[in-house]
Amino acid sequence: MPVALCAMSHSPLMGRNDPDQEVIDAVDAAFDHARRFIADFAPDLIVIFAPDHYNGVFYDLLPPFCIGAGAQSVGDYGTEAGPLDVDRDAARTITREVLDSGIDAAFSERMHVDHGFAQALQLLVGSIIAVPTVPIFINSVAEPLGPVSRVRLLGETVGRAANKLDKRVLFVGSGGLSHDPPIPQFTSSPEQVRERLIDGRNPSDAERKAREQRVITAGRDFAAGTATIQPLNPHWDQHLLEILASGELEQIDTWTNDWFVEQAGHSSHEVRTWIAAYAALHANGPYQVTSSFYRAIPEWIAGFAITTALTLSSNHTK
Ligand SMILES: O=C(O)CCC(=O)/C=C/C=C(\O)C(=O)O
Ligand SMILES: [Fe+2]
């Protein structure tokens, strides 16, 4: 069956700390193109790879990967709250294939997800319940992280499993690219913050507002050149986009976790969601990137990219 891909950056600062209108117009045009691409493809199922930012997954139990057969959006940063429309049978089929292939992904009948999933679904298809979905969490912020080679293998296996579903499947990756927003690191956090990273479910409205305001302030200061966070790395971002477009994904296996952080910031690990999505597409045959947008947007603390791709054998429209 035909498969397609849309990989995009997310940022909770969109609409909260915006760049010049010219940049917003360019991003809006790129999202309009992606939405048309997806509408023309008319997916029966979206398999979305996304991170969490200590809203759904915490250090009390932190898997490298988790496949959701049920999922609940927490609604942070004003994103849609409530259940996603998860295709349970598809999620269980994919999980069996992933486990049989030797990748020890966790499984959840009620995975809690945040803006990493919800913003992408809302921007691409209008809502967290517009298209049946299989959400796949990839840990991208809470160190220690496994090697990125395991992420590629996860994506490959998910792609093979999706091929057996007899559905038109859209793979979505959400996150990245280079960026270093002020997300706490456990080892360098004070005890009170560590407690939140271990088990910070259901924060009060005031606590959530304070966390969100801290990120908004960081975005404003970063754009003003007064923040102390790591610069964006457009060169690294373009290099990654070229590799993903080439299909020669195995070369990424040699990239160490420290190198990701040195080159592109702690949250550059979110590109794991892109690597998994492209590996899933690649498992279905040779592909072509059909659109690629990139802008470094300091106001959103993001090397911001949106790409669409299609296997050569997929007829684009239903
Ligand atoms: O303060 C926290 O615990 C989390 C802050 C947060 O949610 C930051 C999110 C930023 C991104 O998702 C991003 O830039 O990718
Ligand atoms: Fe993120």
Image (cartoon, rainbow, N blue to C red):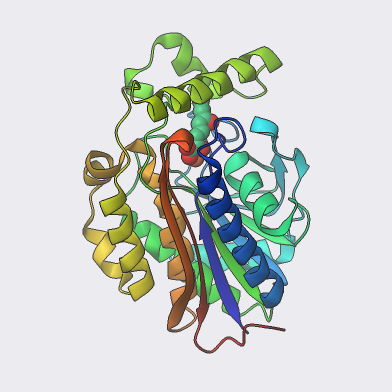
Which quarter of the rendered picture does the N terminus lie within? bottom right
User: Which residue is painted at 42% across and 31% down in the image?
Assistant: 181
Q: Of residues 95 and 117, which is closer to you in this image?
A: 117
Q: Of residues 15 and 160, which is closer to you in this image?
A: 15
151 relative position to 119: left or right: left
Tell me where residue 308 appears, x and y as whole percent: 52, 68
Q: Which of the 4 image quarters holds residue 316?
A: bottom right
Q: Can residue 101 be seen in this view?
A: no
Q: Which of the 4 image quarters holds residue 153?
A: bottom left
Tell me where residue 43 appears, x and y as whole percent: 69, 72
132 relative position to 33: left or right: right
Image height check: is 126 above or below 54? Answer: below
User: Which residue is painted at 49% across and 70% down in the image?
Assistant: 291
231 relative position to 58: left or right: left
Tell me where residue 25 appears, x and y as whole percent: 58, 51
In this rendering, the count of numbered labels is 0
Q: Of residues 153 and 119, which is closer to you in this image?
A: 119
